[in-house]
Amino acid sequence: MKYHVKAAEFIFGDDRPFASCHASTLELLPGGEIMAAWFGGSREGAGDVAIWTSRRTGGKWTAPVKVAEREDTPHWNPVLFRRGDGVLLLYYKAGRRIAEWETMVMRSSDNGATWSSPVPLVPGDAGGRGPVKNKPIVLDDGTIAAPASLEPAWDCFVDLSSDGGETWTRSETVPIDRSGFLGKGIIQPTLWESAPGVLHMLTRSTEGAVFRSDSRDGGRTWCPAYRSGLPNNNSGLDLAKLDNGLLALAYNPTRPEPGQTKGPRSPLVLRLSRDNGHTWDDELLLDEGISQYSYPAIVAGGNEVYITYTWRRERIAFRQIAIAD
């Protein structure tokens, strides 16, 4: 495979209206436009952290716009998802402590120009239902599957909706053997479907490796999570499936030091799989250096992938990459 980097840029400059930013997300819009979102404020977990968005149109990003905030309440991990009917959804977490996260959702019928008021995704939620970092996917039967996880338990599950995301049913928790497991467990899955009703996830872990689980009943139940051949530094990753079945994974290919549960968040790379995620080749360096290049989000359109990621907690970087034989 060959890569052609068509765009490599920052979404905003040094004159940003926040000191720190993280956990970006993106979605493709009609006409070649792109919407991105992230959380930004004085520092992660501070009461002034809000959700911000920007739109790429004509090859340029608009100035950041604050779209969600609540007084003295940290906001976290936005996720964009455009339904088949054109409604753009923005999910995010709100709460002082991760264990108390409430998932909120906003809707836009004009591709993010205006948004509805935020409402809870699941009434009574405490801990975070719906997508926790990575995008939902639409299954062969039209079901929306949202990759989810809970902390401090560090368990993964999937939320399923058969009515366009209005109501959700929680899958069973992904089983994991914690005997001899280093650290807390697995979180922040990314999903793909390889055949009708056959789903797979890759997850972040505290064990120094990306973990995987598989489902053969549309995501309702999952096999015990097992170690993949990919390293993981206990940081976020994301995957997109191209129309030709190729899988594109953005992640940090690093491990913690022996006995530790966190590793360096550099470099950041893109790798491809032709065999449903069992092996990975064709590494492309996205970024490296001091500090961190982390928490990628990736979507696919045709033979191209679009990626955003955290750049040193100061900016959000964007890459557009064509993939060809």
Image (cartoon, helix red, strand yellow):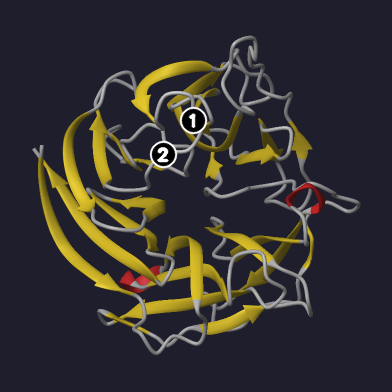
Q: Tell me what residue is drawn at x 31 percent, y 41 percent.
A: 242
**Residue bearing mark 2:** 263
295 with respect to 126 (left or right)? left
188 with respect to 296 (left or right)? right
The quarter of the image holding the N terminus is top left
Compared with 142, 42 (above or below) is: below
200 with respect to 217 (left or right)? left
Q: Is residue 278 visible?
A: yes
The answer for how far apart the CA atoms under marks 2 and 1 are is: 8 Å
The spot of residue 199 in percent (x, y) is 52, 25
The spot of residue 175 in percent (x, y) is 67, 16
CB under 8 Å between callouts 2 and 1? yes
Q: Tell me what residue is drawn at x 18 percent, y 38 percent.
A: 283
Q: Which kind of residue does numbered mark 1 sit on?
A: Gln
Q: Is residue 195 visible?
A: no
Q: Neighbour class for label 1 at 10 Å: few (<14), some, many (≥20)?
A: some
Q: Tell me what residue is drawn at x 24 percent, y 60 percent.
A: 320
121 vs 20, nearest the viewer: 20
Q: Neighbour class for label 2 at 10 Å: few (<14), some, many (≥20)?
A: many
In the picture, residue 275 is in which quadrant? top left
The quarter of the image holding the C terminus is top left
Query: Please, what secondary structure does the residue beneath circle 2 have?
Result: loop
Q: Nearer the viewer, mark 2 or mark 1?
A: 1
Q: Which kind of residue does numbered mark 2 sit on?
A: Gly
The spot of residue 49 in percent (x, y) is 64, 73
Q: Residue furthest right?
A: 124
Compared with 316, 325 (above or below) is: above
Query: Please, what secondary structure does the residue beneath circle 1 have?
Result: loop
**Residue bearing mark 1:** 260
Q: Tell me what residue is drawn at x 44 percent, y 66 percent.
A: 313
The spot of residue 14 in percent (x, y) is 35, 85
